[in-house]
Amino acid sequence: MLILGIETSCDETAATVVKDGTHILANVTATSAGLHEVTGGVIPEEAARKQLESILPVIDLALTDAGLAHTDIDQLAVTCGPGLIGSLLVGVETAKTLALAWAKPLVPVNHLVGHVYANWVEAKSTIAFPALVLVVSGGHTDLVLMRAHGKFAWLGGTRDDAAGEAFDKTARLLGLPYPGGPKLAQVADSYRKTHPDLTLFPRPMLTTPDYDWSFSGLKTAALNYVKDLYFTGRARHPLSLADYEQVAKDAKVKRAVPQLAAEIQEAICDVLVTKTLRAAAEYKPKSLLLSGGVAANARLKELFQAKLSAQRLPLAFQVPQPKYCTDNAAMIAAAAHFAGKPMPWEKIAADPSLTIADAAT
Ligand code: KG4
Ligand code: ZN
């Protein structure tokens, strides 16, 4: 089965050709991230405009790379949500048009289910069910139990900010360039080599008897710490949003960036790992899978591995290659192959507010 997958939920325009759900024949991604570096975050309107410019060339290139014509494709698959409405519309309406013009079945895919299926892309071994899956992206943090292909039970998630958002917003506060997560991780990892004891920031909801997280308090704790540094030897005054650029340039704040980055990363990873492993002890899955952009974080993987062996939990631990953790179209084609159903194109619509709980069965 050959699936042409399309993903346009945010600032990446991606198309892929995947054989039998796991084998990549072509994988093309254009990104407008460089544009958003200037503004320090994605401007939805700009991202949508770039999607429109890139979508057809990216699909064309994916077919060329795969050495195929559109007539060779069995199915189309497209991300229908969640994401930015303008960006989603470009992918969904393009896929619907192609499905009609080429007379091919079209499978709508929940972007978060797509992230889960990144674990099947070029997987070296079969994944045993039940699988406990932690989805940690820029917009979502969810823990789900997957009993079979397409069978999800939602166990918990963030009550406020997503883990990726906590990385990105605190990185911005520290004056690190967009996208903040990978940059903050890089600075944090070099500091941690010589300073392994990282307990400065609180671990919210660590002991609550649920599988929920909260990351907005960490953002406030980091903000207050930075403000205190900035106002040392200065008269306190209210800060406007524009003032924070100056705050990040303060010598005392700049000196503290490696330490704060490491403390922030450790606090985020600690709560994610602790609660996920508590769920593993309760539900006794055969596999533990990570997915989403934050799953590319090296410290998160390392902490999971260390605690899994310390707690002697007998499960297979898997994380997609970093390029399949962040947004890509291969995961969308994989999800369509293993868990998707074609729908008449007239009934498919972009839905920016979908959650992974919408895929729960
Ligand atoms: O899954 P994704 O590509 O897009 C969404 O669906 O949101 O995730 C992007 C998020 C961003 O918040 C980015 O900063 C974060 O993943 N991220 C990382 C790393 N690489 C990407 N966060 C921490 N460490 C990383 N190495
Ligand atoms: Zn994503």
Image: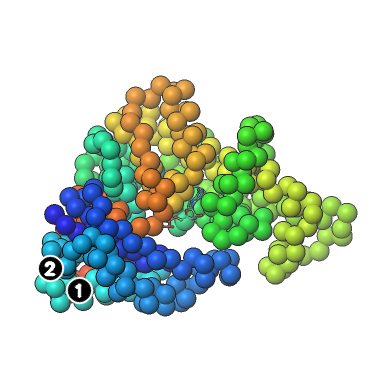
> Would you say 90 lies left or right of 231 here?
left
Regarding residue 290, the answer to whether it shows in the image is yes
The residue at which mark 2 appears reads as 71
**344 over 66 or under it: above or below:** below
Tell me residue 143's x, y (percent). Answer: 38, 44
**Earlier sequence position, callout 1 versus callout 2:** 2
Residue at x 21% of width, y 41% of height = 148
Scheme of colours in the image: rainbow
Tell me residue 147's x, y (percent). Answer: 24, 39
Mark 1 secondary-structure assignment:
helix
> Would you say 239 lies left or right of 172 here?
right
**346 over 309 or under it: above or below:** below
Mark 2 secondary-structure assignment:
helix
Regarding residue 6, the answer to whether it shows in the image is no
Q: Nearer the viewer, residue 208 or 253?
A: 253
Residue at x 20% of width, y 74% of height = 98
Tell me the kind of residue under disc 2: Thr
Tell me the kind of residue under disc 1: Leu
Q: Nearer the viewer, residue 31 or 151?
A: 31
